[in-house]
Image (cartoon, rainbow, N blue to C red):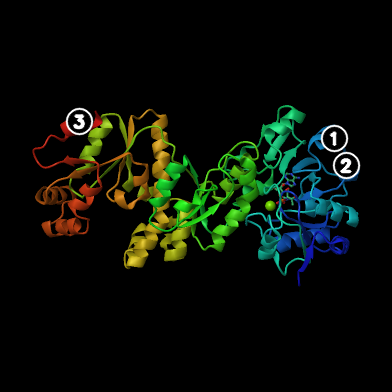
């Protein structure tokens, strides 16, 4: 089908849009939050087309849009009196209220629930289309299911061109994130989705409300979503998104330490430090962050970046909505660089005695982060496994377990394979390491020590205040490896030769611990700790 492009400031557009809707068609309309894909809410057949156009899961109900309070009565069992108090303050505007539905609401809208979500948008064009059609309009965000919500008509066209009857271009959406969804069907009312109206604003009218755990957390296996839309990975560009908490300085160092080019999704004025960047709003301004976040997420794909590191938004006010959406687009991947204990990098060539130094530091109250262990843990993450099987073949999974030996055989057989393996696993190792540091911090460790043979090739180096390298002469290392791993001298020599030179380590380190036979390393460490 050919999608008609209409301009909102043209009177004829409004009547054309209304006409299409009355005839059971689909029209994408601008609202103050995001663009909505509208259909006659009372026509199950028309509503079904929305699900098809978006590729939306059948069990995710839609919001019904009205232009006046009188229109609500027939749609619900009984108008909860609190709706009038809410309406007085926040309607028309970015608030959706859930009540018990009436028989008029088709099952397609409520996805089988006995409730209906209602909102009165403030965007002039949306209001005109509702009034002109004389219909309540069911409208989810006008994006392909799973993608970032559209805040410009061009976003709608990107996702739905040829799949819907028309799009009305009303410029950029002012709020930029979807409406707040609150249900009055629970006592106290429950905030199901944060949005343009803040929890504080709701409480000012409703008194205490509860916040659904799904706002911040991934649903556990088998758990039922109160708001089905919150259960999917959502709002996601094709690129992998990671949220980075901490100061700009920490963010910058961490990004610049990445081995590959990543896209910095940061605040106004910060982008100039990076090769590829997109700025979204001002650092201390949740309103501007909300306004730009979805466009920024779409831009990441447009500039062709596979990984995006997003500066954490303000998490209060409207920022709560931005954070909630970002958590889903990042599949809950958050790295918090704000660490309150000292972090020390510990590295060195094989056989030099890194492990021995680690053991001494452990006895002195430090926590040791063993990156070898984390490398094994990283490949247990389902998302990592999915990426590995996509790159190296589905048959590296046998009986739903990763065949690590087969993976290694395929990955290490070519330089590209080796590189691809690191690109997939290293971000997860990094995330796990920083998560472990925060656990150590909470349990009272004096410092965290990152034990990593290839520390200087890892972005983890950016969180280390000081780097220690352990050195020993080649003869000592040879003997230690042969004894430790029961291998021949020539095999031990192969391993040594596969590693960077001693100078490579010492040049980049702040502290060098000499661990030749006969030296007192404990004394050296005590000196360092002081
Ligand atoms: O700002 C908005 O709300 C936009 C514009 C177009 O109005 N619409 C929007 O719709 O965001 P959608 O479908 O993308 O999100 C609706 C959310 C989903 O999370 C859905 O699960 C939830 O509202 N929802 C709808 N009806 C519900 C119900 N009866 N009970 C619980 N959750 C409901
Ligand atoms: Mg949506």
Label drawn at residue 69: 2
Q: Are marks 2 and 1 in contact (CB under 8 Å)?
A: yes
Q: Nearer the viewer, residue 49 or 123?
A: 123
Q: Earlier in the sequence, mark 2 or mark 3?
A: 2
Please provide percent x and percent y for residue 39. Answer: 81, 58
Q: Nearer the viewer, residue 375 or 119?
A: 119
Q: Residues within 10 Å of mark 3 (few under 14, many from 20)?
A: few
Q: Earlier in the sequence, mark 2 or mark 1?
A: 2
Q: Relative to 307, does residue 179 appear above or below in the rendering?
A: above
Q: Element type at marker 1? A: helix
The residue where tag 3 is placed is: 527
Q: Residues within 10 Å of mark 1 (few under 14, many from 20)?
A: few
Asked if residue 277 lies left or right of residue 126, the reply is left
Q: Element type at marker 3? A: helix
Q: Relative to 497, does residue 267 appear above or below in the rendering?
A: above
**In whole angstroms, how far apart are the C-alphas of marks 2 and 3?**
74 Å
Quarter residue 414 falls in: bottom left
Label drawn at residue 489: none
Asked if residue 431 lies left or right of residue 102, the reply is left
Label drawn at residue 84: 1
Find out if the beta carbon at label 2 lies less than 8 Å from the nearest ligand 1 atom: no
Callout in the foreground (2, 3):
3
Can residue 238 be seen in the rendering of this structure?
no
Please provide percent x and percent y for residue 372. Answer: 32, 48
Q: Residues within 10 Å of mark 2 (few under 14, many from 20)?
A: some
Q: Element type at marker 2? A: helix
Q: Quadrant of the C terminus?
A: top left
Quarter residue 202 falls in: top right
């Amino acid at each position: 089908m050919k999608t008609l492009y209409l301009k909102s400031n043209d009177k004829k557009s409004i009547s054309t849009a209304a006409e299409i809707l009355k005839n059971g068609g689909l029209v994408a309309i601008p609202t103050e939050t995001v663009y909505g894909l509208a259909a006659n809410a009372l026509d199950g057949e028309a509503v079904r087309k929305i699900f098809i156009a978006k590729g939306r899961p059948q069990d995710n109900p839609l919001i019904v849009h009205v232009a006046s309070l009188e229109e609500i009565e027939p749609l619900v069992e009984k108008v909860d009196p609190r709706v009038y108090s809410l309406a007085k303050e926040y309607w028309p505007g970015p608030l959706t209220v859930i009540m018990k539905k009436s028989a008029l609401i088709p099952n397609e809208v409520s996805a089988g629930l006995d409730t209906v979500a209602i909102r009165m948008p403030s965007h002039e064009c949306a209001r005109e289309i509702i009034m002109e059609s004389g219909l309540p309009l069911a409208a989810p965000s006008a994006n392909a299911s799973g993608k970032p919500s559209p805040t410009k008509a061009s976003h709608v066209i990107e996702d739905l061109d040829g799949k819907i009857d028309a799009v009305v271009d009303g410029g950029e959406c002012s709020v930029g994130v979807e409406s707040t969804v609150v249900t009055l069907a629970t006592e106290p009312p429950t905030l199901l989705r944060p949005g343009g109206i803040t929890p504080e604003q709701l409480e000012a009218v409703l008194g205490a409300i509860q916040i659904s755990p799904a706002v911040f957390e991934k649903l556990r296996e088998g758990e039922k979503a109160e708001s089905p839309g919150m259960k999917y990975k959502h709002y996601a560009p094709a690129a992998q998104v990671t949220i980075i908490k901490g100061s700009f300085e920490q963010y910058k160092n961490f990004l610049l330490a990445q081995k590959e080019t990543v896209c910095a999704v940061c605040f106004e004025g910060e982008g100039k430090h990076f090769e590829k960047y997109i700025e979204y709003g001002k650092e201390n301004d949740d309103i501007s962050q909300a306004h730009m976040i979805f466009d920024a997420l779409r831009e990441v794909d447009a500039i062709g970046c596979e990984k995006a590191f997003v500066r954490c938004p303000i998490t209060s006010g409207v920022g709560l909505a931005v954070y909630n959406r970002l958590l889903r687009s990042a599949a809950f991947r958050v790295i918090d660089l704000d660490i309150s204990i000292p972090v020390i990098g510990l590295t060195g060539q094989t056989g030099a005695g890194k492990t021995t130094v680690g053991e001494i530091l452990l006895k002195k109250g430090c926590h040791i982060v063993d990156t070898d262990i984390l490398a094994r843990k990283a490949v247990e993450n389902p998302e990592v496994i999915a990426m590995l099987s996509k790159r190296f073949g589905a048959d590296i999974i046998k009986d739903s377990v990763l065949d690590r030996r087969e993976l290694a055989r395929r990955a290490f057989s070519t330089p590209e394979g080796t590189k691809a393996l690191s690109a997939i696993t290293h971000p997860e190792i990094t995330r796990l390491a920083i998560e472990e540091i925060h656990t150590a911090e909470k349990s009272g460790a004096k410092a965290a020590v990152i034990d990593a043979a290839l520390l200087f090739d890892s972005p983890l180096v950016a969180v280390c205040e000081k780097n220690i390298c352990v050195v020993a002469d080649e003869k000592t290392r040879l003997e230690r490896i042969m004894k430790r791993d029961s291998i021949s001298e020539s095999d031990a020599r192969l391993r040594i030769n596969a590693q960077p030179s001693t100078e490579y380590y010492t040049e980049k380190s702040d502290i060098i611990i000499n661990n030749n036979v006969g030296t007192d390393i404990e004394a050296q460490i005590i000196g360092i700790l002081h």
